[in-house]
Image (spheres, rainbow, N blue to C red):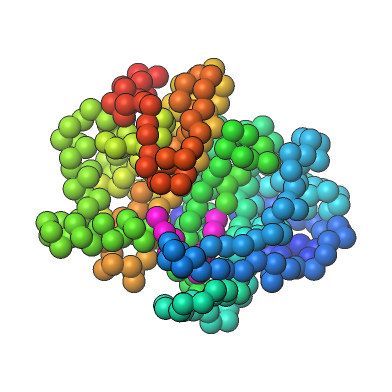
Amino acid sequence: MTITPTRWTLADGRELLFFDLPGHRCAPVTDRRQLPAQRDAQSELRFDRISGEWVIIAALRQDRTYKPPAAQCPLCPGATGLTSEIPAPDYDVAVFENRFASLAGADGHKFLLPADPGPGFVCEPSHGRCEVVCFSADHTGSFADLDSRHARLVVEVWRHRTRDLLSRNGIEQVFCFENRGEEIGVTLTHPHGQIYGYPYVTPHAEATLRRARAHRASHDTNLFSDILEHELSSGARIIARTDAFTAFVPFAARWPVEVHIFPDRPARNLLDFDDAELDEFTELYQMVLQRLDRLYDEPLPYMAALHQYTDTESQCEGRFHAQVISTRRSATRLKYLASSESIMGAFINDVTPESLAQTLREV
């Protein structure tokens, strides 16, 4: 599946991309809003010497749009060019640079964080890219509700943006994700996700790769392949399978609702799959989201993530997988990340993975 976006420019110079379904062509209009010029220098990277991790300081995000009424949603189409981040009478999928970006400046110049930041208080300029992906012009829909062609287009957009961002100087990791629901902290209800291009390998990915390297050294096998093999042998936490992908609740799930989708063959990121495999992934991913939405009387608040790795990381020990988690532990109760989880990183789960898997198989 090959897609070529229509490229547009917003009033403050940010890039906007339109991705069309077959037989449809978006017709954008001039963005006539009075916006301040792009502010690439509004965030910075600071090194935490205790954890050994980089922290993004982005005060600009304090000004981001907060729970506007539906009539003022900045992600709905704006045919006049005066009301929306997407100046067009309609669209299928739209991607634009986040106006309140945590990272910016990946414009082609070389960038490399110091391997050894040294003993002082180290601060580096912002570098990276933050994009918003609007799944549909429909303000009240969701990814799970999209028809199969439209959902597949979104997945193709993720692949397109992954390829583009990984080709840019200084981008070390591309992270496609979706936050849904006020309980998760979402401030815009229009169905959308985001993509971050980081200038470093994130702490979670780095820790995962260390574990994968250690597993290879000890067992001469791939960590992710072994996990999938053990889950399939057990069967207790399997939710559904296709020819190329398996959805399951992980053995040591940290969250009251947690589902992983693993490919049956080695793949580092979306670029490693062919069209038929991505068709299957789209179908299974949507099915998982639809089942999650039937757990309770209201749609489930969730965080969804695509874990992707690149050529240079650990001799390709990293494996692509999707993850969906929710803080809702019952129809009326949320799990809050209190001191044990937030400070010590020691998770306590109130729901057994096997019972969740059984419910999702039956729902």
Residue 243 is situated, as x and y percent measured from the top left of the image, at: 27, 40
- The residue lying at 73 percent from left, 39 percent from top is 67
Front residue of 104/294: it is 104
Does residue 87 lie above or below 127 as drawn?
above
Question: Is residue 271 found left or right of 327 in the rendered image?
Answer: left
The part of the image, by quadrant, that contains residue 221 is bottom left
Residue 321 is situated, as x and y percent measured from the top left of the image, at: 36, 49
Question: Is residue 79 found left or right of 76 in the rendered image?
Answer: right
Question: Is residue 313 found left or right of 302 in the rendered image?
Answer: left
Q: Quadrant of the C terminus?
A: top left
Seen from this angle, which residue lies furthest left? Answer: 219
Residue 278 is situated, as x and y percent measured from the top left of the image, at: 39, 48
In reply to whether residue 22 is colored magenta, the answer given is no
Residue 54 is situated, as x and y percent measured from the top left of the image, at: 49, 65
The segment highlighted magenta reads 195-204
Q: Is residue 269 visible?
A: no
- The residue lying at 20 percent from left, 36 percent from top is 232
Question: Is residue 108 found left or right of 41 in the rendered image?
Answer: left
Front residue of 20/187: it is 187
Q: Is residue 289 visible?
A: yes
In reply to whether residue 199 is colored magenta, the answer given is yes
- The residue lying at 41 percent from left, 30 percent from top is 256
